[in-house]
Amino acid sequence: MDWLPFDLATWAACAVIVGGAYVIFGITAFGAAMFTVPALSYFFPLDYLLPMCVILDVSAAFALGSRFSRDADIGELKWMAPFSLAGAVAGVTALVTLPQQATIAAFGIFLCGYGLYSLLAQAPQIGVARHPWAVISGFCGGAAGTLFGVGAPPYAIYLSRRLPDKAVLRATLSNMVLLSTSIRALVFLVGGLMLWDRILGALLLLPFALGGIWAGHRIQLQASRETLLKVIGVLLLLIGASLLLRVLR
């Protein structure tokens, strides 16, 4: 089977990792890359791994977003999406002008702080103003996606304080994640990194990602909104810690 981009033992190990990571995605609509990228980096170089993971993320966000798109809050998306695109452009510019390590560390500290706050405090109160916070969260999410490869946390922080229904929260967040990951996929495509072996690798692992999403969806149906928000808090804390670890390394 010389046409495979990796051997069967590696494929089996990666399938387990991807399936588990996308259980989290099925529950919260983000966070899979926090597990897949570090774990799969033991098997693949980053120029192979990152495009493959972006394909998985785009596919997962599309699968989740399209199935539950009727639950998404269109009003929030109309405000957040344009500013997310503007933020992505600004993030590309900042990538070559700002001191990258200091910027990553500041973002990581913020996510750790907010993650701890959300775990220790009461459930966030609904009713934060759409203006200007939709603009700020959209812009910051777009910029963070191109700067750090992590765009969902600003969206999740804002939407968790706007949307009382957990199904609406997940559907709206998954649509924003789809936009963010699609921008990154386009960057990789333009940069010549979307080669056939990356696409084939993603296709071989996609069934396990979709299986993980299905399992996560079943779990999400049984969980309360408060539990879902605690899971999001843990993810924000872990993502922040992973960014700080990246700086220290």
Image (cartoon, rainbow, N blue to C red):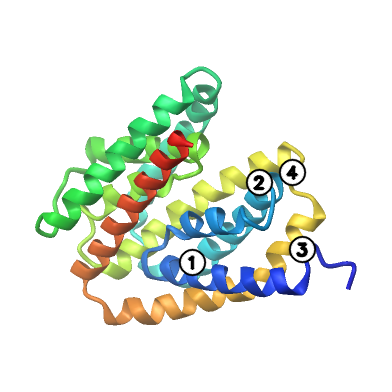
Q: In the rendered view of the protein, which quadrant contains the N terminus?
A: bottom right
Are discs 2 and 3 less than 8 Å apart at CB?
no
Q: Residue at x 51, y 17 (%)?
A: 97
Residue 29 lies in what quarter of the image?
bottom left
Does residue 140 lie above or below 218 as drawn? above
Provide the residue designation for mark 2: 46
Q: Nearer the viewer, mark 4 or mark 1?
A: 1
User: Nearer the N terminus, badge 2 or badge 3?
Assistant: 2
Residue 249 can be seen in this image? yes
Q: Looking at the image, which is closer to me, 82 or 222?
A: 222
Q: Residue at x 59, y 63 (%)?
A: 59
Q: Secondary structure at mark 3?
A: helix
Q: Secondary structure at mark 1?
A: helix
User: Nearer the N terminus, badge 4 or badge 2?
Assistant: 2
Are discs 4 and 2 less than 8 Å apart at CB?
no
Q: Specify whether 196 is left or right of 148.
A: right
Provide the residue designation for mark 3: 200
Residue 228 lies in what quarter of the image?
bottom left
Q: Position of residue 133 (x, y in %)?
A: 25, 39
- Per the rendering, the mark at residue 193 is 4
User: Nearer the N terminus, badge 4 or badge 1?
Assistant: 1
Q: Position of residue 46 (x, y in %)?
A: 66, 46
Q: Residue at x 23, y 42 (%)?
A: 113
Provide the residue designation for mark 1: 21
Q: Specify whether 239 is left or right of 191.
A: left
Check disc 4: other Cα within 10 Å, few if <14, some if 14-19, many if 20+. some
Does residue 101 lie above or below 238 as drawn? above
Instruction: Give the CA separation, mark 3 to mark 1.
Output: 19 Å
Are discs 4 and 1 less than 8 Å apart at CB?
no
Q: Amino acid at mark 1?
A: Ala
